[in-house]
Image: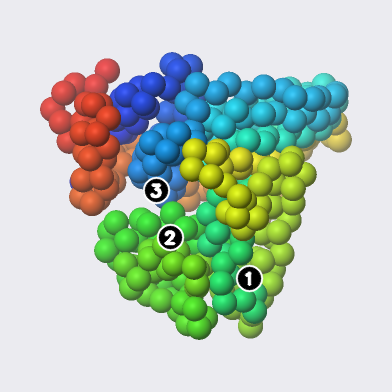
Amino acid sequence: MNVPHERVRAQIEAILQSWGMAPDLLATTVEAMIETDLLGVDSHGISMLMTYEKRVKDGSLNLQARPRIEKQNACTALVDGGAGLGHPVSAFAMNLAVDKAQQAGVGIVGVRNSHHFGAAGVYARIAARRGAIGMVTSATRGVTMVPTRGAAPVLGTNPLAFAAPARRHPPFVLDMATTTTAAGKVKVYDLNDRPLPAGWVLDAKGQPVTDPKQGFDIVFNRPDGGLSPLGGSAEMASAKGYGLAMMVHILGGTLVGSSFSPIRNRTQKPGDPDDIGHFFMAIDPAAFRMPGDFEDDLDDVIDVLHATPAADPAKPVLVAGEPEEAERQRRLRDGIPVPGSLDTLIRGICDRSGAAYLLGSNVSVV
C-alpha cells in the first residue's frame, strides 16, 4: 500500500515517543527518517525501526543522549554521540561543520560513540542547503562486505555522500554504499519477495545468490558470504569498491576513535553501545571563488551533462541526486510504498511498545 507521508511521519513519531525519546531529539530523528523515505531510500527510513527496537530492548541505545563537543578548534571538532541514535548528532555535526566553514573556509567534524544514522545523503544535503559543499562518511556496525579475493565479510556497506549547491539546478548529491548494494536493499527485496539482481550477494564460494530469503540470511545471519564490493567481482574492478570502503572507515571510524566491527565483535557485551563513528566535512565555495561563481559554473556543467545524447531517448542523462528528487515529488503526491510484510512488522512494534498504529488507520493526522 501507499501511505501518505504525513501518516508515515506520525507513525515514526508515535513509536519513538513510546520509547521515551526526548522531544527535540525525536523531531530531528523523524525529519531525517521521513526525508529518507521520501527520497526513495526505503532501506534506511521507517524500515529501520525493527533494528532500533532491538537496540532499545538490549539497553545499548540511549534515546536521551545529546551531542557533546569533546574538543574543537577553528576548523575541526570531535563530538561524542552519547550512544544515542545517529540522526540528532549527525545533523548537529554537519551544521557545526558548515558554521566552521563559513568562518574558516572549511569545517570538519568527527563523531564517535554513535549508532545508525540513516542515509548519509540527508546530512550532505544540509550543507548544500546552506550553500556549502558537504561530504559524509560513516563506519558501520554490520559486517557484510566480502573483500576482493575473500570468502567471508570483513567490512560494512561503509556509505559515502557528497553534495554541492547549484543555482538553477537542484544540488548535486551523490549518496552511495561502497558495496554493490546496501544491506538494507537486500532487506527491502526480502520484504517484497523480489529476486535479487545477480552479483549483489555472494555465497561462501563466491557465487551470486538471487533468492531474496537466502540472500537475506547470508547478509544478516550467516558468517560466510555477503555483499560484493562496488564493482561486483575482481574482473569488474571490485578492488575499487573495497578500497573506497577502507577510505570511508578510516575517516568515519579510525580517525574519530570509533570501533571497527570485526574487532568490536570480540569484546562487545550485551548492552554495550555500537560505538559507530561518522565524518562530516563542509567547504565554503566563497573561500575559493567570488560569491555565486561556483554555483553558476556547476549549473553549466550540469547543463552539458543533461545535453549528452541518450542511449534511450525515453531515459535522458541525469546527474546524481535528480532521481531521488523526482522520487521525492512522486511520494509527496502519491504516498510512500509500505509493503504488507513491513506493515505487519510495524504493527508488531506498536503492539509491543503501546504506540498507536497509524499507517493504515482512519485516525486523522495533523
Percent x, y of residue 140: 58, 50
What label does residue 169 carry, if any?
Answer: none
Q: Nearer the viewer, residue 132 or 85?
A: 85
What label does residue 147 carry, if any?
Answer: 1
Percent x, y of residue 202: 48, 75
Instruction: Judge depth for marks 2 and 3 and give the one in front.
Output: 2
Residue positioned 50% across, 21% down in the render? 64
Q: Is residue 245 visible?
A: yes
Element at label 3: loop
Element at label 2: helix
For disc 2, the neighbor class at 10 Å (few under 14, some 14 to 19, many from 20) is: some
Element at label 1: loop
Residue positioned 75% across, 24% down in the render? 70
Q: Residue 286's image quarter?
A: top right
Q: Which residue is mark 2?
A: 220
| Amino acid type at mark 1 | Pro
Is 286 left, or right, of 331 in this rendering? right
For disc 1, the neighbor class at 10 Å (few under 14, some 14 to 19, many from 20) is: many
Mark 1–mark 2 Cα distance, whole angstroms, equals 17 Å
| Amino acid type at mark 3 | Asp
Percent x, y of residue 254: 74, 48
Quarter of the figure with the C terminus: top left
Instruction: Judge depth for marks 1 and 2 and give the one in front.
Output: 2
Look at the numbered discs 1 and 2 and tell me whether their residues touch, using CB distance below 8 Å. Answer: no
Look at the numbered discs 2 and 3 and tell me whether their residues touch, using CB distance below 8 Å. Answer: no
Above-or-below relation of 32 to 146: above
Percent x, y of residue 212: 33, 68
